[in-house]
Image (spheres, rainbow, N blue to C red):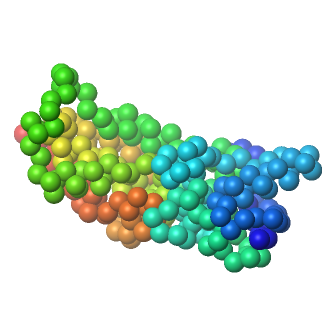
């Protein structure tokens, strides 16, 4: 298969970037978009040109590093899929594919397709953890958690922190990410002791990082590769209101 790739090239955050058109041939339908970029980089190196910088790690849809906007869609047009899982068979032979970085004020471009998503790390450091001493792990059946609650917590915990929700949101909001991290701890008994401080601190850090406000567009849910539901945002709002009321007492 042959493709024309229009890739965003930018030396650093200070320089002006733009799309550069490349032709790649000999691509297998079973290759991923990242493997196609690997092939293109090999061709560029053979010509003595600078390879394209992009993030990747596990390439199995687990880590969330492969954050690309492909033909206008974060992670590409396939539902519930990361960039590394997007196979070239989903495109037509000879098609032009536009590849850009995630775009958000809180995700500044480092180089080419690489953006700095450390804002997520700082939001997590503000409260996305359980710090109380719990002693030895009890038997699973000693901590009674209703199955429907456990299922909701596990669904929220599936978030891989890729940032697709931010890239898809017209306001570059991080509400779905923060909501997922708040939800899976708020629903479980282990997260109860720090419940109020967690949501207050994480919401404050989210705003400090420059993420936009949620406008209920539902674009975040549509773009999420793990299909995190916007119902978690409603839970985040309830947790935040509860914490504010309790802190005023």
Of 108 and 223, which appears nearest the observer?
Answer: 223
Of 130 and 144, which appears nearest the observer?
Answer: 144
Vertical arrangement, residue 79 with respect to residue 243, above or below: below
Of 31 and 64, which appears nearest the observer?
Answer: 31
Quarter of the image holding residue 186?
A: top left
The spot of residue 120 in percent (x, y) is 44, 43
The spot of residue 171 in percent (x, y) is 45, 62
What residue is drawn where x is 25% and y is 32%?
130
The spot of residue 224 in percent (x, y) is 43, 61
Quarter of the image with the C terminus is top left
Q: Is residue 10 left or right of residue 185?
A: right
What residue is drawn where x is 27% and y is 58%?
232
Q: Is residue 72 left or right of residue 229?
A: right
What residue is drawn where x is 9% and y is 36%?
142
Is residue 14 something that shows in the picture?
Answer: no
Number of numbered discs on residues: 0
Vertical arrangement, residue 224 with respect to residue 131, above or below: below
Q: Is residue 54 left or right of residue 238?
A: right
Is residue 178 something that shows in the picture?
Answer: yes
What residue is drawn where x is 77% and y is 71%?
1
Q: Is residue 29 left or right of residue 76?
A: right
The spot of residue 167 in percent (x, y) is 51, 59
């Amino acid at each position: 298969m042959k493709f024309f790739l229009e890739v965003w090239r930018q030396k650093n955050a200070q320089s002006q970037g733009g799309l550069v058109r490349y032709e790649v041939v000999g691509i297998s339908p079973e290759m991923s978009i990242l493997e196609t970029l690997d092939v293109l980089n090999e061709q560029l190196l053979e010509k003595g040109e600078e390879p394209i910088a992009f993030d990747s790690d596990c390439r199995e849809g687990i880590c969330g590093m492969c954050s690309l906007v492909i033909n206008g869609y974060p992670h590409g047009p396939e539902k519930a899929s990361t960039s590394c899982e997007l196979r070239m068979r989903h495109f037509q032979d000879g098609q032009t594919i536009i590849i850009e970085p995630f775009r958000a004020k809180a995700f500044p471009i480092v180089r080419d397709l690489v953006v700095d998503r450390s804002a997520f790390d700082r939001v997590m450091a503000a409260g996305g953890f359980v710090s109380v001493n719990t002693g030895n792990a009890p038997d699973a059946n000693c901590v009674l958690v209703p199955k429907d609650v456990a299922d909701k917590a596990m669904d929220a915990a599936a978030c891989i922190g890729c940032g697709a929700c931010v890239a898809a949101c017209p306001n570059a909001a991080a509400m779905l990410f923060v909501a997922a991290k708040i939800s899976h701890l708020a629903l479980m008994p282990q997260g109860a002791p720090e419940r109020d401080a967690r949501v207050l601190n994480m919401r404050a850090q989210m705003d400090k990082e420059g993420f936009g406000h949620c406008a209920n567009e539902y674009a975040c849910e549509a773009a999420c590769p793990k299909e995190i539901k916007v119902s978690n945002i409603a839970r985040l709002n309830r947790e935040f209101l509860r914490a504010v009321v309790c802190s005023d007492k």
